[in-house]
Image: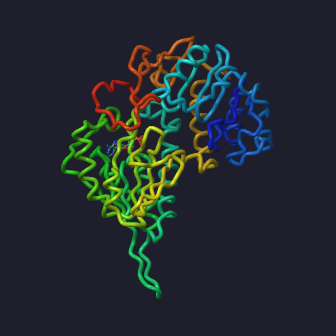
Amino acid sequence: MKVSVVKETAPGERRVALVPEAVVKLRTAGLDVLVESGAGDGAWHTDDSYADAGATVVSRAEALAADVVLMVGKPDAAAVAALRPGQAVIGLLAPLTDPDLTKALADAGVTALSMDMIPRTLPRAQPMDALSSQANIAGYKAALLGASQYGRFFPLLITAAGTARPAKVLVLGTGVAGLQAIGTAKRLGALVSAYDVRPETRTEAESVGATFIELTSVGAASGEGGYARALTEDERVAQQDELAGHIARHDVVITTAQVPGRRPPLLVTEDALKSMAPGSVVVDMGASTLGGNVAGSVPGDTVLTENGVAVIGASGLPSTMAAAASAMYARNISALLLYLTKDGELALDRDDELQAGVIITTGGAIVHAALAPASDPPEAGPDTDPSSPDQPDEGAARVLPGPAR
Ligand code: NAD
């Protein structure tokens, strides 16, 4: 079976789906590995390093003709057009927010497997959990970005030239990325507080060094599978108002809040930004073209508010650490591929819970339970009005890849 790696085409994407170490592993399992020339450049892996690991370096057209095509993100339109029935594609395909791509892959007769749909509750899926591996990297980098933008120290420093008090850092959202942001800011010496709408995250946040903040105006909003549910309009306003008081007392705020399949909830309003001291920093990991966790954040850019608060639109952070992110992603995708392979061939079985979770199209149809063609488009889809608040929970009946503990 020929397995290929294509070069990513999304703007600014530097990651690659397999690193040479993973090629060796797949070769040992009897797979032929093809790598598109230049695929590893952004992550500092040369064509020669792939060839040394046993891969064949090929053109894009040859890579796209393999039995299984591996990628980090989504295939672009030209790649989808090049695919043929019977081929398999594996990547972070985001089918909950990109129904058009899912349909195009089904129409192409391709078997598409989406890494972001892996049922994270299954212990055997944990080595394949790319959402966690990439969120870990993003949380680490978000804390570093906050520290480097902040014009003062994170740690307490007592020197002959004076004493610097430690920075007060607030992390909003304590999932995988948030916990890593807490740990990183803590290791840099900051005083870290954290908040999440799921109260069960308190122990985890405290275990990595944060003081957990509880809001009195909003109750628990734990949803299905370990994720948060979207808040109602009333809850959202109450949360924003109460959070604003906490935000004003912090020097650096890092936001990581997500609700699967929806636009990120707005946690830091314009008024909250106005209440912050000049020189404060807000890192919005949820920044997207649909709007992020922070009012006015621009993905990939840093905006300075009139009162001197730097708002960093920190989208795409894993790609900024492409070598580490690719190494982890390569382990995730190789683990899935080897799980699906029997005697050197892909042996798919949709009766298997893990596979049913990850296969989104096959045999010309959309087959995933959460992607029934008749359902409404997801709220976070491209047609969502970015100016509208995050939608309430009603109708969010999608089957999501729940996290495992
Ligand atoms: P995520 O990226 O979907 O969300 C990030 C965080 O934002 C979540 O903790 C969520 O509760 C929070 N959030 C959402 N709306 C919010 C709001 N309005 N206000 C404040 N916070 C809000 O989550 P994730 O990082 O993918 O992980 C979800 C959970 O699953 C975490 O508890 C994580 O530890 C757990 N998990 C465990 C494993 C494992 O043990 N193997 C693997 C993956 C995830």
146 or 91: nearer the viewer: 146
* Relative image position of residue 7 (x, y in whole percent): 69, 36
Q: Is residue 36 left or right of residue 145?
A: right
Question: Could you tell me which residue is drawn at 24 percent across and 52 percent down?
Answer: 242
Q: Is residue 133 left or right of residue 51?
A: left
Relative to residue 150, is residue 312 depicted above or below?
A: above
Q: Quadrant of the C terminus?
A: top left
Q: Residue furthest front?
A: 306
Relative to residue 394, is residue 227 depicted above or below?
A: below
Q: Quadrant of the N terminus?
A: top right
* Relative image position of residue 31 (x, y in whole percent): 71, 27
Query: Within the image, what quadrant is residue 309 found in?
Result: bottom left
Quadrant where ligand 1 appears: top left
Question: Could you tell me which residue is drawn at 57 percent across and 11 percent down?
Answer: 363
Relative to residue 367, is residue 288 depicted above or below?
A: below
351 or 152: nearer the viewer: 152
Total marks in image: 0
* Relative image position of residue 245 (x, y in whole percent): 26, 58
219 or 374: nearer the viewer: 374
354 or 376: nearer the viewer: 376
Question: Could you tell me which residue is drawn at 39 percent across and 46 percent down?
Answer: 293
